[in-house]
Each structure stands twice: as C-alpha cells, then as structure tokens.
Amino acid sequence: MKSLTDAVLSLSEKRVSSVELTQECLIEAKKNKNNAFISVCEDSALQEAEESDHRRSTGELISSLDGIPYSLKDLFITKGIRTTAGSRSLFNYIPPYQGGVAGYLKQAGAVLIGKVGCDEYGMGSTNEKTIFGPVLNPLNTDHVAGGSSGGSAASVAEGSSFFSMGTDTGGSVRLPCNFCGLTGLKPTYGRVTRYGQIAYASSLDQASPMAASVQDLAIVMEIISQKDDRDSSQANLEPLNISQELESLSGDYLKGKTLGVDSSFIDACAPKIKEEQLRALDQWKKLGVEVKEITLSHLKYSVSTYYIIATSEASANLARFDGIHYGYRAKTNDHSSLEQTYIDSRTQGFGDEVKKRILLGTFSLSSGYSDQYYAQACKVRRLIANDFQEAFKQVDFIFSPVCATSAFKLGEGIQNPVQMYMNDLYTIPVNLSGLPGLALPFGQDSNGLPTGFQIIGKHFEDAELLKIGHAFQREGK
Amino acid sequence: MSKEIDSSDVRHIGRLARLTIHAHEMGEYEDHLRKVLGYVDELSSVNTQDVCAFYSMTREYSELFQDKYFRKDKPIESLPVSEIMKNAPESKENQFQVDAVIEGDA
C-alpha cells in the first residue's frame, strides 16, 4: 500500500514526478489482477500528470493533491468518462456534466487513474453483486474485498491508487477498509457534497475517502469538503483545514479523552476479532484515554430499520431509470404500451439484488403498509439516534467493531442473504444517525487477514475524529 | 405481525415498481421478501409512542442551524440539448425516440 503523505513529500522535494507515480499506478491498474477497475483512464491520466509536473516546474501548484493518482468508485459522475454504477442499466452512460467530488479533485490537480468497481448502485457488502464480476481482496484473493466500495479498497491496497473515493450508505466504505487493511472516514452526513453521486438512499449516502492512514485522509478531506451550492443537503461550513494541525499534534493529545464502548457489541464478534477489539481498547487506555461502558440499547434494531428506510429511498431514487433518456433500453416486441419499454428496460437492466431491494422498498411504501413499515422504521431511527445523543453526554467518542468477522470468502454470502445483511450491524447505526465514523485497521485474524475497529464522533466533529485517529496511529500501531 | 407474502403479492409489488418477476425466479423473490419481512417484523415490537420520526438529516440540521442550509435559487445555463442526446438510447432530430405505440382496444 502506498502512502499519500509520503508521495506529497516526494513530489515537493522533486524526488519523483507525477508522471512517474502515474505510470506506476497505471501498470497495476491495467493488470487489474483483483478486478478493481471498470475503466482505466490511461491517456487522460498521463496528460493530467504532465500538466501537474509542468505546474510544479513553474511553481503554480494548485493543492497538496496536485499530481497524486487516485481512483473513483463508479458511482461518482465524471464528465466524459463512462459511469456505470456497476450496473447494466448504465453500462454505456457517459455523463455530460461533472459531479461535485470528481470536479473538486480535478480542480485540485489530482490524477484520475480510473473508475473502480462496486456492488450495483452501492447495494451489497461483498462487491460480488455487479455485472463486472467480483472484486478480489488483494491480501488474499480467495476472499472478497468487501463492499460496496470494493474496487476502491482493492485499488488502494494493491497500489494502483494513493487514495480512493467510495460512498458509504450503511458501511460501504468502512467495511472494505476493514477487510483490506485501509483507513476510511465516513464523514458526518452533509460534510461532503453529494452532487453527482448516483443516489442509493439519499438520507444515508455519504462520499467517503479511503487511504493508507488518517494523515492521508485529512489531505483528501480538505479538498472534498468544499461547500457546494448544488447540494442542498450539504452543511454550510468552511472546508476542513486539518493537515497542519495533525502534524503538530502534541504527544499527550489523547490524555483525558473519554471513549465509550458497549461491550455487548464486542462480545458478539468472532473470537479472534473480539481478541483484537480488546487489545485495541488496551492500547487506547495505554495512550491515556479513559474507556467507559455505555449502553446503546436500540442499535440492535439498526439492520431492520436500515433495510426498510434504505430500500424505500432506493425504490424512489431508482424510479428514474426508464430506458428512455439514457442507459439501457430493452428491445421489446410488445408495442401495446410505452410502459412495457420501461418495464422491460428495468427488468433487464437491474441485477437481482437491486430488484429485491426495490421490491422491498416499494412494499414498505405501499398503500396499507407504509405506517407499519416505513413510518415505524423512521421512529426507531430516532430512538437509535437518541441512544448516541445520550452516550455523547458521557463520552467524547465511541468505540465499536466494524464487522463481527474478517473478509468473507468469495460466494459465502449467497446462501443466506439475511445473515449477510446482519454483517452491517455495527456500521449502519452511524449512517442512520448521520454521525462521522472512522475505520482504523488494527491487528489480524488467524489467517493473516486484516481486522480493525471504528471510532464514532459527534455531528460535524470530523476534525476531532481525525485528530484522535491520527494520534492513535502515530503512537499506537 | 408480519404480512404473509405470496406470489400474487410479489407480482403486485413488481407492477408498482415496473419490474417483471418471471415464473422461474418467483420462488426466489418470494422467499427473499418473506425472510426479510419476517426479520424486520421485530420493529413492530418497539414502543414508538410519542416518538417523532427521523426522516432526513437535512430536516434535523435545519433545526440545529436554522436557515443556513438554504440558498437562493440561482438560474444557470442548461447543458446543450445535443450533449444530453448523446446518451439517448434512440433519438431523432434532438428528440428522444420511442417505438410507435399502437393503442389497441382489445
């Protein structure tokens, strides 16, 4: 795995050029041995790298990310570059406009290596549910990279990108980070623009960076947290300005901070994962953090709450795909109605998992059932968010596993879908409550696969979260 | 109490969602929906009396941050029609084209 922070330094000291970094990444991306990439942007990447090197030679650098190669989950709209959402329904879609995240990174001079794989429309935990085939875990290719941002995680772990942008609706960035040994931040909902991010569940989706360390994430967050007037659900805040602060963070920064933990979460983990969670907590204590027991009693309903709310929103968001204006259109011999073209295009364009979720969401919102399912789920969502609010009266941050296991074997989840949904139990509550969550790698399972944990912060305290995460990584590895 | 799902329900929901569930896949879809609805039934046991629903963060934030989340509408130039049409599955003279629909009265 490559360090973004080191690459920024190497570029500034002119020990390496952006073209050289880009060529190295392109070699890996084109091999595509873990099936991370859907599209490799070789020509434009080399051109962007040359332009960056030229700016560097004339002292006109735009940002710290100038000349840094990265990848984007194929849910981010990129002007002139095919954007598929991992779906047949958009297999040939070339956006005529630039999305927010892609635009800010381009303006910052970052070099787009390519668009990477994901579960179709972000719906999955394994990155196996896509027409482009499963993304493999670079650390052990018998295992999944995790999902839905599996291509992002694999591209960073295999060294074809210095960072990647994923999206996290119920854990889709923190889970693949956990499975591939990366660091990932699901920012507070509203901290990063969603303009030009293909919607799965609008009240939960959040663009999220993935990289080798907290320090690397901080550099990316400074660029992508710019205020975007095109997203009315983005908070009216200044971009994060945190990198310098991280560098000068005092040695005893963690002293006196309090970390809440609901032990029942840890007890529910597989034995080796539990062992690593307890070892991580010991490490926090050694660094001066006070660990306090808290109770988050409604979080056990998170998976049910999430699958009602997320699929309800998805059923509405994905109604736009009708085969008329863009994307896949079915050839139909039934000319009795235009509606048949919509139905056939959608039926052939969407994969099974997407259709199952649309059906569940449609049912949850349908006449006679919406009070019992959707409205009730939104009330339980309030109780889950309240549990966090209460906990944050007693502690500064909350510690939790990311997943009860390490990376699943390929094909493992196909037999029992409800069990597979349960794997998101620890990540989902963070999205339901709109809080920021930082996934940190820590330890290994008995097969040498990475394990880790997450730290949850208060609304809009993303900078604080990055600070304690950095202090931990600096001292506690 | 969870709703007992059968294939006619799945077909009905499919119609609402503009999706066809073919006969050979009906068993799988029906089973999946039944399992998930059986699981989420736990929500009905949660006491939510007097609990205010949480629909979206934006709504939460507008209370926390008053009107900072809203801006005035700013009209901007639209994309050229010819650019939009490049993604149309079928188009003619800068318009979306669909198959002729023959309305039958059968």
Image: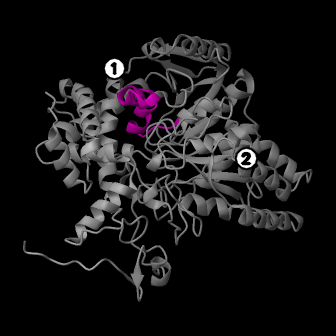
Q: Which image quadrant: the N terminus of chain A? A: top right
In the rendered image, which residue does mark 2 sit on?
Answer: A160
Question: Of A184 and B65, which appears nearest the observer?
Answer: A184
Q: Chain of mark 2?
A: A
Could you tell me residue A305's position as x and y percent?
30, 34
Tell whether position A430 is magenta: yes
Mark 1 packing: few (<14 Cα in 10 Å), some, or many (20+)? few
Residue A145 visible to the viewer: yes
Q: Quadrant of residue A357?
A: top left
Mark 1 or 2, closer to the camera: 2
Which quadrant: the C terminus of chain A? Answer: top right
Q: Earlier in the sequence, mark 1 or mark 2?
A: 2
Q: Residues within 10 Å of mark 2 (few under 14, many from 20)?
A: many
Could you tell me which residue is drawn at 54 percent across and 28 percent down?
A455
Whether the magenta-drawn stretch holds residue A372 is answered as no
Give the total number of marks visible in the rendering: 2
Q: Which residue was labeled with disc 1?
A: A297
Element class at badge 1: helix
Give the residues drawn in magenta, as a range. A413-437
Secondary structure beneath dot 2 equals loop
Q: Residue at x 67, y 25 (%)?
A: A472
The residue drawn where x is 36% and y is 65% is A330
